[in-house]
Amino acid sequence: IHYSSRNQRIWTPTCFAYPFGAISDGTQTMLKTMGFQSSMTCESHTNQITRDPECLFGLGRYLRPGLQSTEAFFQKIGL
């Protein structure tokens, strides 16, 4: 968190979500240079999180429709 001259909080994002899954060569390097600590794709897959910070880039995510219950969603993906 940063504070402006008016003592307002300014949040610095640390995670980047690729819009529509649009990933290009060099994007991950650029995001790291900009200070991002993780990124999420639009691919549906379970992630393996380790102590290696590199594993936080290219994370998969499951897109759940807003009207679907959490229980139904997890049942559908087998969790």
Image: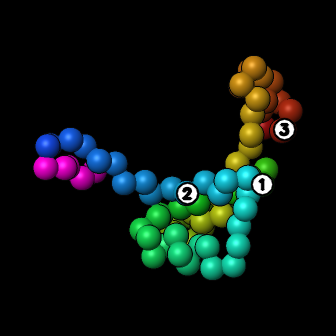
The residue labelled by disc 3 is: 78
Q: Is residue 52 visible?
A: no
The residue sitting at 59% across, 73% down in the picture is 28
Residue range in magenta is 1-5
Q: Is residue 32 above or below residue 16?
A: below
Q: Residues within 10 Å of mark 3 (few under 14, many from 20)?
A: few
Judge from the rendering whether residue 24 lies leftward or rightward of residue 78; answer left or right.
left
In terms of depth relative to the viewer, which is nearer, 9 or 55?
9
The residue sitting at 84% across, 38% down in the picture is 78
Q: Earlier in the sequence, mark 3 or mark 2?
A: 2
Q: Amino acid at mark 1?
A: Glu
Q: Is residue 39 above or below residue 78?
A: below
Q: Earlier in the sequence, mark 2 or mark 1?
A: 2
Q: Amino acid at mark 3?
A: Gly
Do the residues under discs 1 and 3 have CB atoms within 8 angstroms?
A: no
The residue sitting at 71% across, 67% down in the picture is 23
Gap between marks 2 and 1 measured at Cα: 14 Å
- Nearer the viewer's eye, disc 1 or disc 3? 1
The numbered disc on residue 43 is 1
- Nearer the viewer's eye, disc 2 or disc 1? 2
Q: Main secondary structure of the magenta part?
A: loop
Residue 4 part of the magenta-drawn span = yes
Q: Amino acid at mark 2?
A: Phe
The numbered disc on residue 16 is 2
